Image (cartoon, rainbow, N blue to C red):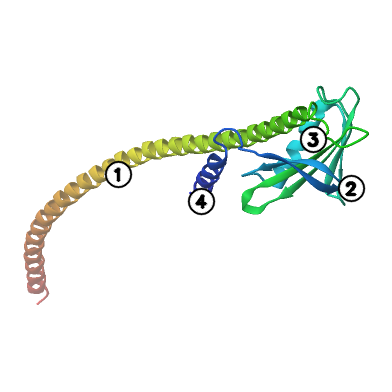
């Protein structure tokens, strides 16, 4: 029962944040990474955790054919030589950081190094939409991951409920068998009681008859004793 309650809670929690696409916002900020302070695209991801966003980013970057590694000391991801259509004919280096925002979820900051400068809407207005498209696609991927997790929880809950129903049905069959067995036992006991009562009545009759026989036999014994005594005197 405790497992069921936990699953219900987990399902409710994921449902509350997974009803469709994450409502993410993207803004530009000057932020610091391992290379210095540069323009970054910052996207809020409400209802997410750092663990799931980090895992999703590593997987998401594979489609851009770059080599992604995690710098633990700086808590940032670097993707070298990524191929991004609409942003550059050359490869692009990408840096990303995921920040925990407590109850608000997480935020991811992404820098796109074009070689001569970092991407911004002001300097590269024609290339900037490609970056927004990437972040929105990532938000969709995170949403999909969360909905998949919601589906797993729902399917697990369904399986537990189906197993519970099977157990209840099995228990009902067993209890019905028990009742039939109990009824059969009661009937046997009732018949045994009736037989025992008849045996008692027969026993009482036999006792009465035997008492009479004893009385008659006592007379016989006394008569024989009397005859024996008369012979000896």
Q: Which residue is mark 4?
A: 2
Across and down, in percent, residue 23 comes to 61, 37
Q: Residues within 10 Å of mark 3 (few under 14, many from 20)?
A: few
Q: Is residue 67 left or right of residue 148?
A: right
For the residues marked 4 and 3, what is the alpha-carbon distance in whole angstroms? 55 Å
Q: Which mark is residue 34?
A: 2
Q: Residues within 10 Å of mark 2 (few under 14, many from 20)?
A: few
Q: Nearer the viewer, mark 1 or mark 4?
A: 4
User: Which residue is nearer to you in this view: 11 or 65?
Assistant: 65
The secondary structure type at the circle numbered 1 is helix
Q: Which residue is mark 1?
A: 182
Across and down, in percent, residue 44 comes to 67, 43
Of label 3 and label 1, which has the lower sequence position?
3
Q: Nearer the viewer, mark 2 or mark 1?
A: 2
Of label 4 and label 3, which has the lower sequence position?
4
Q: Residue at x 50, y 44 (%)?
A: 8
Task: Kindly give the residue lying farthest to the bottom in the view shown.
Answer: 233
Q: Is residue 222 left or right of residue 177?
A: left
Across and down, in percent, residue 83 comes to 86, 25
For the residues marked 1 and 4, what is the alpha-carbon distance in whole angstroms? 34 Å
For the residues marked 3 and 1, what is the alpha-carbon distance in whole angstroms? 86 Å
Q: Quadrant of the C terminus?
A: bottom left
Q: Are marks 3 and 1 in contact (CB under 8 Å)?
A: no
Q: Quadrant of residue 52?
A: top right
Of label 3 and label 2, which has the lower sequence position?
2
Of label 2 and label 1, which has the lower sequence position?
2
Q: Which residue is mark 3?
A: 122
For the residues marked 2 and 4, what is the alpha-carbon distance in whole angstroms? 46 Å
Of label 1 and label 4, which has the lower sequence position?
4
Q: Quadrant of residue 213?
A: bottom left
Q: Residue at x 32, y 41 (%)?
A: 181
Q: Are marks 2 and 1 in contact (CB under 8 Å)?
A: no
């Amino acid at each position: 029962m405790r497992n069921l309650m936990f699953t219900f809670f987990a399902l409710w929690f994921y449902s509350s944040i997974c009803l469709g696409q994450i409502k993410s916002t993207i803004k530009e900020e000057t932020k610091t990474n391992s290379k210095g302070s540069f323009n970054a695209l910052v996207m809020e991801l409400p209802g997410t955790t750092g663990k799931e966003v980090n895992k999703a980013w590593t997987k998401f970057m594979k489609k851009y054919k770059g080599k992604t590694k995690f710098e633990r000391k700086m808590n940032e991801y670097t993707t070298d030589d990524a191929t991004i259509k609409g942003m550059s004919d050359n490869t692009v280096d990408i840096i990303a950081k995921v920040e925990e925002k407590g109850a608000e979820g997480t935020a991811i900051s992404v820098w796109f190094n074009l070689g001569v400068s970092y991407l911004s809407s002001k300097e590269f207005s024609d290339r900037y939409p490609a970056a927004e498209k990437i972040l929105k696609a990532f938000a969709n991927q995170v949403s999909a991951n969360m909905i998949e997790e919601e589906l797993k929880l729902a399917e697990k809950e369904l399986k537990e409920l189906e197993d519970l129903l099977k157990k209840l049905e099995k228990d009902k069959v067993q209890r019905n068998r028990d009742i039939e067995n109990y009824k059969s036992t009661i009937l046997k006991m009732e018949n045994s009681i009736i037989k025992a009562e008849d045996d008692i009545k027969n026993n009482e009759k036999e006792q009465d008859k035997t008492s009479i026989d004893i009385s008659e036999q006592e007379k016989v014994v006394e008569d024989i004793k009397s005859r024996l005594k008369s012979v000896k005197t």
